[in-house]
Amino acid sequence: MANDAQSPADAVRVNDLHLRLTSAAGPVHVLRGIDLRVSVGETVSVIGPSGSGKTSLLLVIAGLERPTSGSIIAAGNEITRLDEDALALFRRDNVGLVFQDFHLVPTMTAIENVALPLEFTGHDDAFARAEAQLSTVGLAARGGHYPAQLSGGEQQRVAMARAFVTEPAILLADEPTGNLDGETGRAVIDVLFEMHARRNSTLLLVTHEVSVADRCARQIHLVDGRIANDTRNAPASTAAPKAGP
Ligand SMILES: Nc1ncnc2c1ncn2[C@@H]1O[C@H](COP(=O)(O)OP(=O)(O)O)[C@@H](O)[C@H]1O
Ligand SMILES: [Mg+2]
């Protein structure tokens, strides 16, 4: 659908976004006027101090948290105008979300976890596609394992397979390596970028690791609910992480 507010090359467009929440200590003005335009296929890291609103920004773009005011156009949908049912469909069809703690269903095997979103969409080949997706994250042999039988890095790869098996246009990752050691974390980020490249999907990645942020083409620095800095990395730095000392 044509929309004057969004060029066809925009995956996400956020205008004057505010989020106010109420905590035990009183009202919190979490997002304070965010303006952001992300092109299709772009990789954007979101950095900033704890409490600056990084998770909240991802949640409103994912349609999981409703903003207090402002607009969000994501994958062509003005999501602030959608009712709960339409919002659930928007999420199912357009958004893949990965968290720091993997959120796998503990009573389901790896393959059952990955097949879950496909079953919601009524695919009859859900298991075949889940199997293929598990092998793209290097876990073809682990489909029958339960989350508790997998390492942290393996669980995160299952979570990514589940988030991206529906081939969403928008990939959102909130500190996906936060619970992993350095080497395991790097392998997880490799998988994330492979998935991004496979479909030219748009990636927004919250991280506190400079080496991870450097792999994105663009970096957004949130401070106190506002974008303090929006910079582009040199093209070469998107190809591979810089060698450490
Ligand atoms: N559900 C909530 N209710 C009240 N305040 C919240 C809620 N979620 C987050 N906040 C507050 O919003 C601010 C931003 O939180 P968050 O988006 O989680 O930041 P970050 O991910 O950058 O650490 C913090 O001050 C936090 O305490
Ligand atoms: Mg956070």
Image (tube, rainbow, N blue to C red):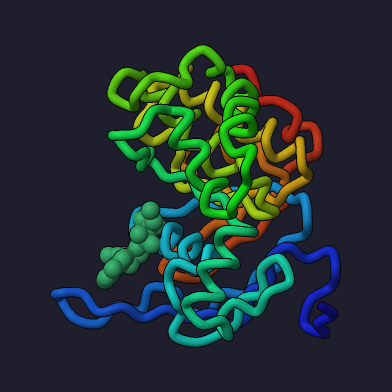
Residue 86, above or below 195: below
Q: Residue at x 74, y 51 (%)?
A: 42
Whether residue 227 is visible here, answered yes or no, is yes
| Residue 7 locus on image (x, y percent) | 84, 73
Q: Is residue 168 left or right of residue 55?
A: right
- Residue at 66% x, 68% y is 74
Quadrant hosting residue 217: top right
Q: Quadrant of the image for the C terminus? A: top right
In this rendering, the answer to whether 190 lies above or below 57 is above
Quarter placement of the N terminus: bottom right
Pinpoint residue 103: horizontal percent, then vertical percent: 35, 42
Residue 206 in view in this figure: no
- Using the rendered view, name the quadrant where residue 145 is placed: top left
Residue at left offset 47%, top offset 77%: 84
Instruction: Residue at 50% x, 60% y: name it.
Output: 58
Asked whether, in this view, residue 177 is left or right of residue 137, the answer is: left
Q: Nearer the viewer, residue 76 or 84?
A: 84
Among all residues in the image, which is located at the extreme left?
A: 24
